[in-house]
Image: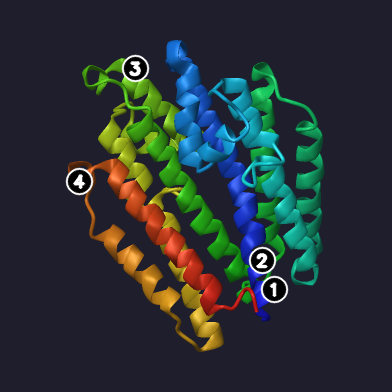
Amino acid sequence: MLGKTAGGLYWMYRYMERSENTSRLIEAGFRIALTRAATSDDEWSSVLEAAGVREAYLARHDQFEQSAAIDFMLRDKSNPSSVLNTIEAARNNARLVRTALSRDVWEATNDLYLQVKAALARPVRDRDLPEVLNLIRQQNALVRGSTHGTMLRNDIFNFARVGTFLERADSTARILDVKYYVLLPSISQIGSALDNVQWENILRSVGAQSSFRWLYGTDVNAMGIAEFLILDRRMPRSLTFCASKAAGNLAYLEKEYGTRHPCHDQADALVGRLSATTIDEVFDNGLHEFVLDFLSDTSKLGASIETDYRFNG
């Protein structure tokens, strides 16, 4: 496969995953802000920081205000990571690799773009926000379903899945960071009802509330939830699950092309580090520091994949 085609597939699925994950990050911030109404506007500084767009937001706004932050993350054309921009970027990449996609996948991607563009034609009111965020997730799910149901399990599929899982891992790490590092209550509130409600909101924002309760019942606590979202191999948005899947798809590419690249070693090393980590070690060394290291590792891995498979050449 040409490197440009591989890159188009990889970024198409990264952008789609990013659009969904940005909607989840908005939901996490929105729900947490509801539990801390007195300082809700200040909390959006933290959400924007976790999304990596705080400085871009400040270039256009003088203060952190909920409606402005949500609009910036959903539909601002000056924000490359806004939901509207990332979905448009996904569709543009899909057009470039149209011949590599099944008809079902292309139609689902095009429909994703058209429906979300219509929903974000104007600023979204708070009362309509849950419905709009749900639409973004549902339309993304249709693309995923079409991909799984109609695409050959070949190099096309593997580049798509590598992009998906790297982006998903990045998002889960950022959502964890919103809660623990930036929105952490005062020390007196750790373990309180408020703290637990906020952690439960994090579970809900990654679609993991039911799964967590099936496994752990009503025992909602910070360490248990963090372990579930970082180390549990059964949770499809956990860091370990995503890293393992990305490494697995890279291994298929290695087998198909008969060549091992540095990115394969990096992916395997990342999975190995996660497998050797305990949640006690994560908390002892600092969850925020762990998240920063993980984001650095996934960023380096993504750069290596682009170089090794010559996305730009």
Q: Categorize mark 3 by other alpha carbons within 10 Å: few (<14), some (14-19), many (20+).
A: some
Is residue 195 shown above or below 311? above
Label 1 sits on residue: 5
Labelled pair 4, 1 in contact (Cβ < 8 Å)? no
Q: Quadrant of residue 63?
A: top right
Structural distance between the alpha carbons of marks 4 and 1: 41 Å
Residue found at x 46% / y 21%? 42
N-terminal label among 3 and 2:
2
**Residue toward you, 216 or 2:** 2
Helix, strand, or loop for circle 3? helix
N-terminal label among 4 and 2:
2
Q: Can residue 226 be seen by looking at this rendering? A: yes
Q: Quadrant of residue 139?
A: top right
Give the residue type at disc 1. Thr
N-terminal label among 3 and 4:
3
Colouring mode (rainbow / by chain / secondary structure / one colour): rainbow
| Image side of residue 30 versus residue 195, left or right | right
Give the residue type at disc 2. Leu
| Image side of residue 125 versus residue 269, left or right | right
Between tags 3 and 4, which lies in front? 4
